[in-house]
Amino acid sequence: MYECAIVGGGIHGTVLAQRLLEDTGLECEEVVIVDPHDRLCESFRRKARACEMDELRSTFVHHVGTEPFGLEHFAEGRGREDELVPTPGYPRRPSLALFLDYADYVIETRELEGLHRKTTVERVRERERAGDELVLETSDGAIRARTCVLAIGRGGRYRHPEWASGVDGVTHVWDDAFDPETRAESTVVVGGGITAGQLASCLADRESVTLLARHPFERAVTEADPRWINWPHVEEHLHVHPPGSRARYETVRAARNDSTMPPYLHDRLEELVDDGTLTVRRGDVDSARYVDGAVRLLLADGGCVSGDRVVLATGFETGFDHPFVDRLADDLALERGYRGMPVLEDESLAWRRVDGTTSPVFVSGWLAQGTVGPFAGNVVGARRSADRITRALETRRREPVQAV
């Protein structure tokens, strides 16, 4: 039986596994990362590749390693300092290639792939024997663990507008069917945030691109005010509200700079517009249809935008009603708050049961935003979550197992 099973091998799962091995008494054979992808952080790689990301929005101290300046030292030791991109009024940011190469370095040196079990968790159940025991039911058999950490992403729950349903030639940027290397004569990118801007700027170098957004672009350097990175700020402005409450949900929502672009990307789009290589349109799509090999978008103001293909960069669904999460909460009688938000203990990120007791399930990632705040799903959120989960699991590990 494992001491800890981490469900999800993305950035959050990778950061947590490393912290558990470094900061607790756990050995490699006591930790397992359960993820169906061929390698750790693969989902992030795919999303970055799909929108042809060049550089990260996060700073160089936000990465999968445990040393704050580890990525910077990695770059300096390999003559790649030029891949730490200067940003006016903000710390340097790593190129995507540098970020991923450092992630590979961390995974290799810490031998984290040896913890990786390539399968999908379908359910999690609790058995009472000599102490608590969780059983993770997977497509490749059962995995037994004393504790479990949910470090999952959105599970493909991308936002698809109603007008796009069933229309040929329309895909989401993160759908497996979309390949940015596939050429088209003309592409319409729908969205007004960083993903839409990044994709449009890259595609514009080789084909005709129209960027269709509902509202004027908004500039923001980071995904939220950097003060939300600090735990005392989270405690003062988020934890004053009851766990799982609507007030917490609304606080996080108001704090996030969703559908914004960093200034350097916005400036790049303006240059492309001035050069005549990118067209920007404003408007709400009323309907869409595929006619004579092209997708026609009819706008609410009576206008029309057409392209050989339409790529949605419209983000994720905002709710907490993930099917796997629903099953887990029902099976383990876990408490949920406003809109299905997990009710977590603020200091440990343990998911509370409906009877008020502490469950052996912990949460990292976007599901923990009601406790960690607006950066919960980001790289820095992974580090902040790992701080608390690691400490809680070490305390739990030292507790004697109670016979029943």
Image: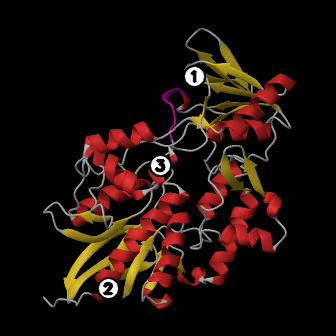
- Which amino acid type is marked by label 3? Arg
Do the residues bearing badges 3 and 2 touch, measured as CB atoms within 8 Å?
Answer: no
Label 1 crowd bin: few (<14), some (14–19), many (20+), radius 10 Å: few
The Cα atoms of the two marked residues, 1 and 3, are separated by 27 Å
Q: Secondary structure at mark 2?
A: helix
What residue is rendered at 40% in x and 51% in y?
Answer: 373
Q: Main secondary structure of the magenta part?
A: loop
Up-down relation of residue 111 to residue 196 (above or below): below
Find residue 148 and report its horizontal and vertical position in percent.
36, 73
Going by the numbered disc 2, the residue's amino acid type is: Arg
Judge whether residue 258 is colored magenta: no
Dot label at residue 227: 3
Q: Nearer the viewer, mark 1 or mark 3?
A: 3
Q: Secondary structure at mark 3?
A: helix
Amino acid type at image mark 1: His
**Residue sitting nearer the eye, 11 or 296:** 11
The residue that disc 1 covers is: 215
Q: Which residues are magenta?
A: 159-163
Instruction: Say what secondary structure mark 1 lies in.
Output: loop
Q: Which residue is mark 2?
A: 397
Crowd band around label 3 with a 10 angstrom C-alpha radius: few (<14), some (14–19), many (20+): few
- Sequence-wise, the earlier of marks 1 and 3 is 1
Disc ID at residue 36: none
Percent across and percent down for residue 39 are: 62, 71
